[in-house]
Image: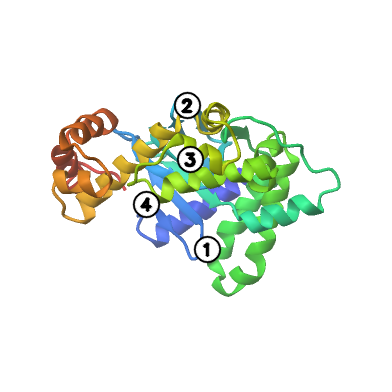
Amino acid sequence: MDELSRLRDAVDTCFACHGNASPLYTAIDGLILLRSAAERNPAHILHKPALCIVVQGAKWTSFGALRLEYRTGQAMVVSVEMPGASQVVEGGEGAPYLSVVIELDRAIMREVFERMEAPPVPDDRAGAFVLDLDDALVGCAARAVGLLREPQAIPILYPAVMREICYRLLAGPHGAVLSRLVVGVDRDRRLVEAIHALREKFDRVLRVDDLAAAAGLSPTAFHRQFKALTAMTPMQFQKQIRLMEARRLLLSGGMSAEAAAFAVGYASPSQFSREYRRMFGLPPARDALRLSDPPGAAA
């Protein structure tokens, strides 16, 4: 049995034990399993730095102007927290889309980088990319999922699996992207900190000039580097975070559209409604109704 087949069997076993509920948040912090038939509408989420392995099926994910397509035997790697839209395009009841999401540990990534004899040199490529999987990375994922059968072994053995994943990624063809964002030069770390500020203070008015100064860059250089990293401008980034949080409030907080608009930083409910519809395809109230009672929703 090859490594991908072994991983698929392990994922199938996990879902069989949990009633095919998806997403499946496992006993390993940051290890998430996904199972789905083809989706009618894109899902909008805030992506954390992670290795997203397609075990079966196909999917696309977009970050601003960047659109990535990946399928069985491939993975998407996200190296900085940013909002994106995803949609399963290949998967059905007989052969559902299956994915293993492994969130990356920054501390272990830094430790591995510092111990490498020839660490990769940081470069300026986009913060998300697709790679073809090899047996080594798939084997790491299979071991991680396999540990779910031995909960007592997880705190002892999983850090070693994460360490190998970090090494394989840093030593691979895209290692420069991860090294720049996780353990790069001070300027790069401050750029990532600016992204975190936009994430945490999405409901406030933030001036690009202030973010640029905090990152030690001119406004022009900051704007250029931010867009190269995330495929969107700082204001587009903040807008997506605002709208995603408003959607969460509409669903879980029982808020009106107007209250959600003000809660996430909009001064104009009509502008909020226009931008919400542009992003999610429906006005806020109708979208919340659709999501609260989706017809024929797949597991």
How packed mark 4 is, by other alpha carbons closer than 10 Å (few <14, some 14-19, many 20 or more), is: some
Alpha carbon distance from label 2 to label 3: 29 Å
CA separation in Å, label 3 and label 4 = 40 Å
Q: CA distance from mark 2 to mark 1?
A: 29 Å
Q: Indicate the position of residue 234 as horizontal and vertical percent values.
A: 44, 34
* Tag 2 residue: 67
The numbered dot on residue 210 is 3
Closest to the observer: 147 or 158? 158
Q: Nearer the viewer, residue 245 or 197?
A: 197
Element under label 1? loop
Residue at 43% in and 47% down:
199
* Residue 69 drawn at (x, y percent): 49, 28
For residue 241, what is the image quadrant? top left
Disc 2 and disc 4: Cα gap in Å?
24 Å
Q: Which residue is mark 4?
A: 22
- Say left or right for 103 vs 136: left
User: In this figure, which residue is indicated by the disc labeled 1?
Assistant: 28
* Amino acid marked by disc 4: Ser
**Circle 1 or circle 4, nearest the eye:** 1
Q: Residue at x 34, y 36 (%)?
A: 239
Disc number lying in front (3 or 1): 3
Tell me the number on the disc at residue 192.
none
**Does residue 25 lie above or below 54 as drawn?**
below
N-terminal-most mark, 3 or 1: 1
| Residue 180: percent from left, percent from top | 67, 40
At label 2, the amino acid type is: Arg
Looking at the image, can residue 57 be seen? no
Q: How is the image coloured?
A: rainbow
Earlier-in-chain disc, 2 versus 4? 4
Report the front residue among 250 and 195. 195
Quadrant of residue 177 in the image?
top right
